[in-house]
Image (spheres, rainbow, N blue to C red):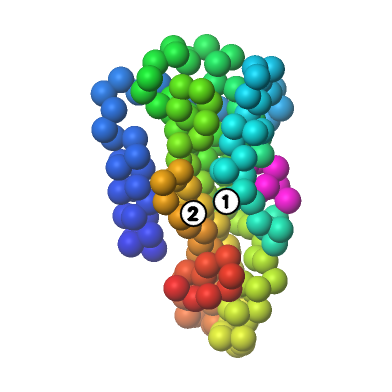
Amino acid sequence: MKTLLFLFAVSVITNFGFSQNVNTERMALNADNMSVSTAKSSPITLNKEYLDNVLDNSMAIHISTLEKQVSQFNIISDSKYKGESKPFKTIFKTNKVSIAVSYDRTGKIINTIEKYASVKLPDAVRDTVFKTYSEWVLLNVDYYVYYNTNKKVKKMYLVKIGKGKLKKKIKVNSNGDIL
């Protein structure tokens, strides 16, 4: 867990630490804070690459819904957006979700760091875990997505299992392969 937290912290520092004048805003993910652009290039088509890379038919519906909302966010209508050439950075949060996003000046998503707490395991992941650890019980599952326009998307489930007093954390990718 310490390694995962360290890697998450390094990713956040790397992605957000190099800008001196950062436009950062924390927002709750809900319909009141989301708007769809009426410009020639809608956020849906502008962020199609993001959606194509992060959406997965086996994931929980609320995850895909939130990722679609993030892809449709209109930075131009945001009062914090100044039209600068620097990336516009914001964090969307709920009690179980944190999505840190960088948008370019047109509203295209550059990168995201996403954490979803207490999610349901997809069938392939669940099958792998319980075939390998048949005597264990599921305690908790967190899901992480790391998206960057210049790199392959990384999706990982951190699965916490237990057997009596023993507890174990397993990293599994979205195909069900134990990492």
User: Residue 5 shows which numbered tag?
Assistant: none
Please tell me which residue lies in front, 84 or 121: 84
Residue at label 2? 153
Q: Quadrant of the N terminus?
A: bottom left
114 sits left or right of 59 in the view: left
Alpha carbon separation for disc pair 1 and 2: 6 Å
119 sits left or right of 80 in the view: right
Q: How many marks?
A: 2
Examine the rendered structure and indicate whether residue 103 appears above or below residue 6: above
Tell which residue pokes out farthest to the front in this image. 40
CB atoms of marks 1 and 2 within 8 Å: yes
Q: Residue at x 65, y 65 (%)?
A: 121
**Is 62 one of the magenta-colored residues?**
yes
Secondary structure type for disc 1: helix
User: Residue 53 shows which numbered tag?
Assistant: 1
Mark 1 closeness class: few <14, some 14–19, many ≥20 residues within 10 Å:
some
Q: Residue at x 54, y 21 (%)?
A: 75
Give percent across and percent down for residue 8: 38, 51
Examine the rendered structure and indicate whether residue 98 appears above or below residue 40: below
**Is 115 one of the magenta-colored residues?**
no
**Label located before the other in sequence (1 or 2):** 1
Q: Looking at the rendering, which quadrant does residue 65 occupy?
A: top right
- As shown in the figure, which amino acid type bears the numbered disc 1? Asn
> Residues in magenta?
61-67
Secondary structure type for disc 2: loop
Q: Residue at x 66, y 33 (%)?
A: 44
Can residue 8 be seen? yes
